Image (tube, helix red, strand yellow):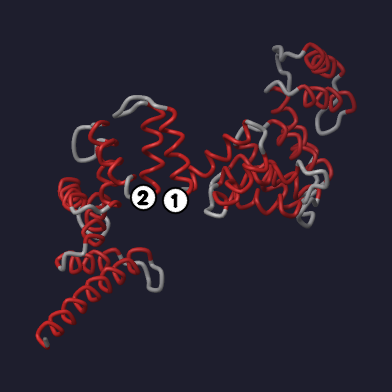
Amino acid sequence: MKKILLLLLLFSYLILAKEDIYEQGKDYFYGMTVEQNYNKAFKLFSHAAKLDNINAQTALGLMYIQGKGVKQNDKKGIELLRKSAHSNSAKAQYYLGTMYYLGIGGKRDFNIAFRWIKKSADQNYADAQQNLAEFYEQGKGTKKDLKKANKWFLMAAKSGNADAQYRIASDYLKEDNIEKAKPWLLKSAEQDNADAQYQLGWLVLQDIVPNYEISFDWYKKSYDNGNDKVAYILASLYDQGLGVEKDYRQSHIFYQKSVKQGNLDAYLDIARHYQKGQGVGKNLIKAYNFTLAAARAGHRIAQREVAQMYRVGKGVKKSNKKAKYWSKNSESKRLGKCINCN
């Protein structure tokens, strides 16, 4: 009896030991409580993998594929992923399927990718469920089946996949069912899905009494998570002091970002800042240049403003001829050609 107890204790100790080593490796890999160090993470994962920790084995496979903490080696990485996948690791099955889908370490094969993703999804691995839904939706590796696609999108959303949650919300919004869309948007937005955060910011503004502070917060989070298109909205909110303290300097910065995206309205807003000296030094020449750039791109309001600038000589030499030219372009809704029209 004592021998059995000792064996059980030893077995429990080994399980705890390999889990502890794996967790230490994760700590170094992500830099959670220690300074990020891929080399140390690789060594700890290797140690845990030798103790048959499947998660560590999967992590090693991914490190080989990414070339983090070790020389990049797709073949070795996929070999480790396959070993873990055959040991029923949902995470390894998902990533192995992804490798086949992308053609990393071998020929691209949607059929094999589908099979591994399906195995992972059946174990409630959220990312695999999301991908499986896309396989069914697009008919990749399997017959196209929208009913199954919708089923797996919903399962992925319930399992916590932010993209799937946003997808479900978007479907409800297409049906104008805002009440059912909002909970899914919130779940997705709380996981830093930039599209969901943007959508929430927009929905708040549609209320009878808009809450600009909440709207601004969601828009800002969306921008911080990579949605550059929100720049113009943030600029406008800073410009008007809606949901945030009025700040022309911040507004100007975001208008500049929007200009780089080709937003013609932003050109006019920057021109206005230069005309009035809001957030920047007053500069009528720069105001003219930004207005002209928008006018040349076909912005009708900008064309009218350029005409007025030439009419009164604001930021540019007065010219009735050029004023008439730009006024005519504005009225005809098209930009013509003009020699020395600057």
For residue 159, the mark is 1
Q: Is residue 169 above or below residue 158?
A: above
Q: Provide residue 50's location: percent of width, then percent of height.
A: 14, 66
Q: Amino acid at mark 1?
A: Ser
Q: Quick one: which residue is furthest to the right in this view?
A: 312
Residue 193 is labelled as: none
Q: Is residue 71 above or below residue 303?
A: below
Residue 156 in the image: state x and y as whole percent. 44, 45
The quarter of the image holding the C terminus is top right
Name the quadrant containing residue 294.
top right
Q: Earlier in the sequence, mark 2 or mark 1?
A: 2
Task: Reply above or below: 1 against 229.
Answer: below
Locate the N terminus and report the quarter of the image it occupies.
bottom left
Q: Residue at x 85, y 20 (%)?
A: 319
Residue visible at 18% across and 69% down?
Answer: 47
Q: Is residue 195 found left or right of 286 in the rendered image?
A: left
Closest to the observer: 20 or 240?
20
Q: Is residue 332 left or right of residue 117?
A: right
Amino acid beneath label 2 = Tyr
Q: Which residue is mark 2?
A: 125
* Callout 2–callout 1 Cβ contact below 8 Å: yes
